[in-house]
Amino acid sequence: MSRTTPATLALTKAGVDFTVHAYDYDPDADSIGLAAAAALGEEPSRVLKTLMALVDGKPVLVIVPSDREVAMKKLAAAVGGKSAQMMKPADAERISGYRVGGISPFGQRKPLPAVIEADALAEERVYINGGQRGLQVRLDPNAAGEVLKAMAAQVSG
């Protein structure tokens, strides 16, 4: 497994301090995020999942702790929309440039509006997908800084 991905390159270029952590990805897990947290030996609140959604038909990134679900009304409101729904996996892969299970908010094909669960910013360190199935980057959510802070909102239910 390569530890260099568009996500890690984007973080390096932005000057973000991070470490890379590989784990055995289980495509059959009931919850990929919870399986990642267990494999890393971390609390689910520290292992964030990156989801792709549509708000009023437009793509949006959503970053939430792996033990939470997105509240669609809260997501729509966070970006000034009326309705939200999860994106179809094939569309998420085409738009992001990553495979489902390996979608990172960093280094996507084109910048998208993004929202991160505000509670995640209270953690000292979080894990976010590094752009490949079974690869996480560990970083200070506030040091990843303006990239993540600008996205903060309460979007889980």
Image (cartoon, rainbow, N blue to C red):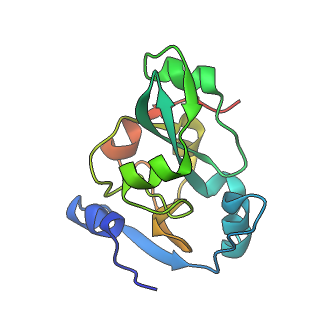
* Residue plotted at (35% across, 64% down): 7
Q: Is residue 155 left or right of residue 137?
A: right
List x then y, in percent, for residue 96: 38, 52
Q: Nearer the viewer, residue 97 or 111?
A: 97
Image position, residue 54 (x, y; %): 48, 32
For residue 123, side relative to residue 34 (left or right): left
Could you tell me how many numbered marks the image carries? 0
128 shown above or below 116: below
Question: Along the line of sight, which residue is nearer the eye, 43 or 57?
Answer: 57
- Residue at 43 percent across and 16 percent down: it is 80
Q: Position of residue 91 (x, y in %)?
A: 46, 47
Q: Which residue appears at 24% of the width and 62% of the height?
A: 15
Seen at 61% across and 79% down, the residue is 23
Q: Quadrant of the C terminus?
A: top right
Asked whether, in this view, residue 94 is left or right of residue 127, the answer is left
**69 is higher (above) or lower (below) than 89:** above
